[in-house]
Structures are given as structure tokens and as C-alpha cells.
Amino acid sequence: MRDDESNWFSKWEEELPSPDELMPLSQTLITPDLALAFDIRNPSNNSASYPHQQQQTPPPPPPSAAQPLSSNPLVTSQPSSAEFAADSGELGSGAAGDEPARTLKRPRLVWTPQLHKRFVDAVAHLGIKNAVPKTIMQLMSVDGLTRENVASHLQKYRLYLKRMQGLSNGGGGVGNGGGSGAGLAASSDPATDHLFASSPVPPHFLHPGRPNSDHFLPFVPMAALQQQQQMAAVAAAAGPPHFQPQYHRPMGHFGSPPNGQFEHPFLPRQTQNQQPVHRMGAPVHNQVPSYVEDLESANGTGGRKVLTLFPTGDD
DNA sequence: CAGACAATAT
DNA sequence: CATATTGTCT
């Protein structure tokens, strides 16, 4: 029914990042000093923290070529300038700048439930037809996320759905209504299923062969039309060879700030001043209310748990 | 040592 | 773009 449709659709809209709520880059990067202070690079003693990233990767910059412009060896590109010029015509005239770090290998991406949820939502709203990595990535509008990441995850996701499909419908009656389709406990792979089960699997996914559904999708948002700008953001995020992007979060200890709410593992791209796509006259309410997603909680109870993953109560 | 996840290559 | 394979981390 349409109600159903508008239901999850509404939720989708609610989940959209609101420029007001979202911070450009709150994720504080670990300063070199700090890293050293905690001896993060220590390979044998990694139990202390829970870094999902490389632990034996040499941070030192490329020996050859090095900085063509800046001959100052003293400058270790201090992260002090945490503020990145998000939207500036830098890429236009940034010929000389040309982020050198784009080629360097990127840290491992951590698919946190929230991020995955976004992924699923994006796919759901795109429809199987348009559910291709590129489109998904663009719709997700997640900063720092690359097509590769999405593609890889997408494949895993498809596997997950396929498994379910085979197990849930044996007689052809796929009347899985609502999100109950994902409610079943057909998990061969606890880990994978667990993560995926956290997010509401769109019904139409399990039965794409249903012409009736015929994919809703009144309009495609096409959020990130400005690919260039996105690139810039990505470059700024994972570009610099030294400090790490905002992926994963460093550690859950420290002083444990009472209001440690600025710990977003991923940064949903803000829909700042973007109005490139001409709305098809769709009476869409511009902007959305508040983007209140479940924020991770460093439960001091178990203490051992990493930081991400946990039943995203989601909605 | 084995399993799982993400990245990379084809 | 999708799939298969490899590498890395837990």
C-alpha cells in the first residue's frame, strides 16, 4: 500500500542529514604526539585499544619526490588546521595543489551499523535497478566513502539477501510484508547476518520478481551531483598521507567526556548549498527536521566491546 | 590456526 | 558493474 511506502519513505527523509545537526568535521584526528603518547603503533600491544586500521603501516611520507613546493622539512603538515576548506574553488585552480595523497592506500573502512543502515536505505530507495555502487555511493553522500567500499559491501549484502531469500521463501509465497522479512532468524553467518539484520531490509529486495511492486521511487534525489566537490572532500579527508581520515574512531578511553556525542564514525555529507538538480516540481518539503540517529555508546559495562555494532535499534 | 571483513584484481 | 581472489585483522 501506499501508506507502507510513505511510511518508510518518511523515515528515510527523517534520516537525511540536516545541515544544522551535522558537523563538517568534528571527528578529531589523532595528533601525532597523541598517537605516540599512547604508543598506538605498538604492534604487540594492540589489545589496549581497538583500532580497526592498519597497525603496522609506516606513516612516514614518501621518500622520493616528496614535497615539490614546500621544501620545508620541518613542516610535518600539522593537523592543527583541522578545518578543511570544504567548498572552495580549490579544485578548480588547485592544479598545483593536486592532492598527492589520493593515490596512497586508504585505511580500512568500518561498516558500522549506522553506516550500513544508510547503505541499505540508499539501496532501498534506489531500487534494485539503480542499486549500483556508483549510484548508491552518490545517494549515500557519505564523506570519504568510495565506490570501491560500496561495491564490496554491496556484494556482501547481496549474498546476505540471497541467503535469506532462499531460506525464507520455499514455496514461492513471498508475502513478506513490512520489515518482518528481515525478522526471521535464518542466519548461517552470525556475524554477517547480525550486522545486516540490524538494518531493516526492504521488502522489495526479497522479491524483485514482483511487477506489482514495480519499484516506487517517485523521484531520485541524486544528492551528490557535484562530484568534484565530493572528491575534494574525500581528498581532504583521506588525502593527507600523514593523519588518518575520519574513519573508525581512535579509542574509547581517555577521559570519556560526559557528552561524547561527537563521535560519528562516518560523516553523512551535508546537503549544504546544493541546488543543482531542478526539482521536478515535487512538493517535497525542503530540508528535514532533526537527524537523530543512534549514536554509538561506549558501554563501560562490558568494557571489552569495541565501539561500533550493536543492535541498532534503528527505529 | 581459523574465520570474517574489507580491499583489490579480473 | 559483478564476481573471484587475496590480504589483513580479530
Image: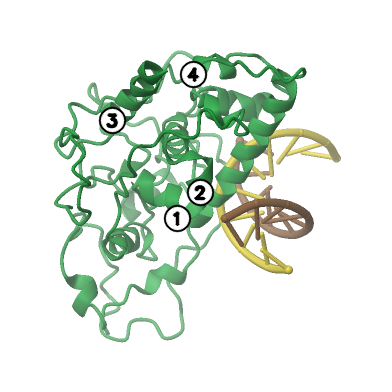
Chain colours: A green, B yellow, C brown
Q: Nearer the viewer, residue A129 or A53?
A: A129
As drawn, the label of residue A146 is: 1
Residue that label 2 marks: A150
Q: Residue under mark 4: which chain is it in?
A: A
Residue A294 location (% of width, % of height): 34, 23
Q: Which of marks 4 and 3 is in front?
A: 3
Lateral position of residue B4 relative to residue A55, left or right: right
In the rendered structure, find residue A311 and report the number of the disc placed on it.
Answer: 4
Q: Is residue A55 above or below residue A308?
A: below
Q: Is any atom of residue A22 visible in this view?
A: yes
Mark 1, Cα crowd under 10 Å, few <14 / some 14-19 / many 20+, is some
Badge 4 or badge 3: first in the primary sequence? 3
Asked if the residue at tag 1 contacts the one at tag 3, i.e. Cβ–Cβ closer than 8 Å, the answer is no
Numbered circle sitting on residue A88: none
Looking at the rendered structure, the kind of residue marked 1 is Thr
Q: What residue type is labelled 3?
A: Glu
**Horizontal and vertical percent for residue A154?**
56, 44
| Quarter holding residue A259 | top left
- Residue A59 position within the rendered picture, expressed as x and y whole percent measured from the top left: 45, 63
- Both marks 3 and 1 on one chain: yes
Chain on which label 1 sits: A
- The kind of residue tagged 4 is Pro
Q: Which of A251 and A167 is in front in this view?
A: A167
